[in-house]
Amino acid sequence: MNVYDSGKMLDVLGDSHGMEVTHDIDEADVLLMNTCSIREKAQEKVFSELGRWRKLKEKRPDLVIGVGGCVASQEGDNIQKRAPYVDMVFGPQTLHRLPELYDQSNEQREIAPKNRIGTIDVSFPSIEKFDFLPEPRVEGYKAFVSIMEGCSKYCSFCVVPYTRGEELSRPLDDVLAEIDSLAAQGIREINLLGQNVNGYRGEKDDGSICRFAELLHYVSHVDGVERIRYTTSHPLEFTDDIIDAYAQLPELVSHLHLPVQSGSNAILAAMKRNHTIDVYINQINKLKAIRPDIHLSSDFIIGFPGETDQDFQDTLNLAKELNFDHSYSFIYSKRPGTPAAELPDDVSFTTKKARLAEFQKVIIDSTLAKTHEMVGTTTRVLVEQVANRHPDCLIGTADNTRTVMFPHDVEKMDELLGKLVSVRITDFVSPHMVKGELEDVLA
Ligand code: SF4
């Protein structure tokens, strides 16, 4: 989501002020930091990085510094109290107002260069952001499309509902118009984005509501779209019509990221996830019956307050039973203002670290085994580029997100770029990369 938002920041400032990205900080006129507050460590990094930027600003007082994203949303004017040299503070829902904030901060600089106060806008102005974003401009063959924003699930550990606001879906026509425009620019793979992407409830022209499964059908019909991914979803909204879509839509990749967070029902209840492990396993089994080759990934929080040895064992057992392809797993991080921050926590940090290491070992072993299992099979690959270090090879991404490299006639490389092909996998290269031979061009 933050990668998508950063792209949009560039789009609005490029469109309004002709700004371009530079990777040389000494060349920059504006420094923007897009922040994440999902864990305490990410939040603290914001202030240490801002400390470095302060030194740059002392040397170059004209430098404009902006902080956006969820830390900005949560901390608001506290950012300027702790870092008064910050010129602009904006939230995820107000990034479209960046050009205005930039102009205001320049005006203030001219009026009162010494007593300048920064501009702050961390409001939640409904979903208007999308009405103000310029036409997407893309390179390559894959693009994100945000279809809904915010979250109304209020899991007890999570800050997102407070930093990004309640769930709001973009109207169906807006989403399809953006995807049409991307497909016309050569995009072949669409990654639908939302905090609870499968909770999408977009308004249709006639005022009725389009649910996520129906949206998948619409997207699959857009000319040029050959592959569809989505992230990130909630088990509560993983309804049977979405599972059925895997039988009906070959465009849907055989990879699902469905966060579960814990394998213990007691911990799931304390997290306020509102489902049990049986419900989750049932959903996965139904999906596996339709797509036996489905690859699964998930999110896990290890060491949630009150997690017993048995709770942790249940999480390990779940990982072993479902054979996750990979996972994002972290030690629980207390977020101020969330209900879980008030829960008693008697598990030592040493125990939590040991549990995380044990858990990650299970996942890493599973990733490795699954990559090895690919050898001898055929996989669908979106061809994206000529391999940098092997100019006689092309590189693309498989449904299960592995990078796939295969040799091809150097004279004919261009013909395959952006195409969906099938590749026979011949060799394991690394846990996330395999080698193979071209079998067929699919689309
Ligand atoms: S569903 Fe996801 S984004 Fe929403 S509160 Fe729970 S963890 Fe946070």
Image: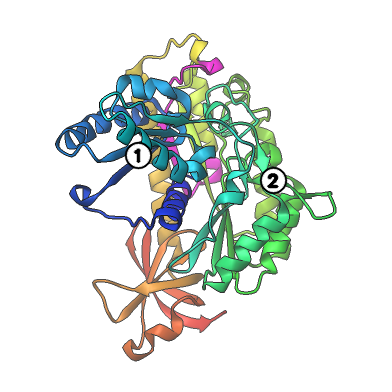
Q: Nearer the viewer, mark 1 or mark 2?
A: 1
Q: How is the image coloured?
A: rainbow
- Which residue is nearer to you in this view: 303 or 426? 303
Percent position (x, y) of residue 81?
34, 19
Percent position (x, y) of residue 39?
41, 28
- Label 1 vs 2, first from the N-terminus: 1
Which residues are drawn in magenta?
Answer: 320-340
Q: Amino acid at mark 2?
A: Tyr
In the image, residue 323 lies in the stretch drawn in magenta: yes
The answer to whether mark 2 is within 8 Å of ligand 1 is: no
Q: Residue at x 32, y 78 (%)?
A: 393
- Secondary structure of the residue carrying numbered label 1: helix
Q: Compared with residue 138, is residue 33 higher up or lower down, i.e. above or below?
A: above
Q: Quadrant of residue 443?
A: bottom right
- Which residue is nearer to you in this view: 57 or 8? 57
In the image, residue 344 lies in the stretch drawn in magenta: no
Q: Residue at x 39, y 47 (%)?
A: 365
The tag on residue 25 is none
Q: Amino acid at mark 1?
A: Asn
Q: Residue at x 44, y 46 (%)?
A: 99
What whole-number distance in Å separates the C-alpha atoms at marks 1 and 2?
39 Å
418 sits left or right of 241 in the view: left
Q: Residue at x 58, y 33 (%)?
A: 124
Q: Mark 2, residues whose alpha carbon is within 10 Å: few (<14), some, or many (≥20)?
A: many
Residue hosting label 1: 106
The answer to whether the residue labelled 1 contacts the one labelled 2, judged by CB atoms less than 8 Å apart, is no
Residue hosting label 2: 200
From where the camera sits, is residue 180 visible? yes
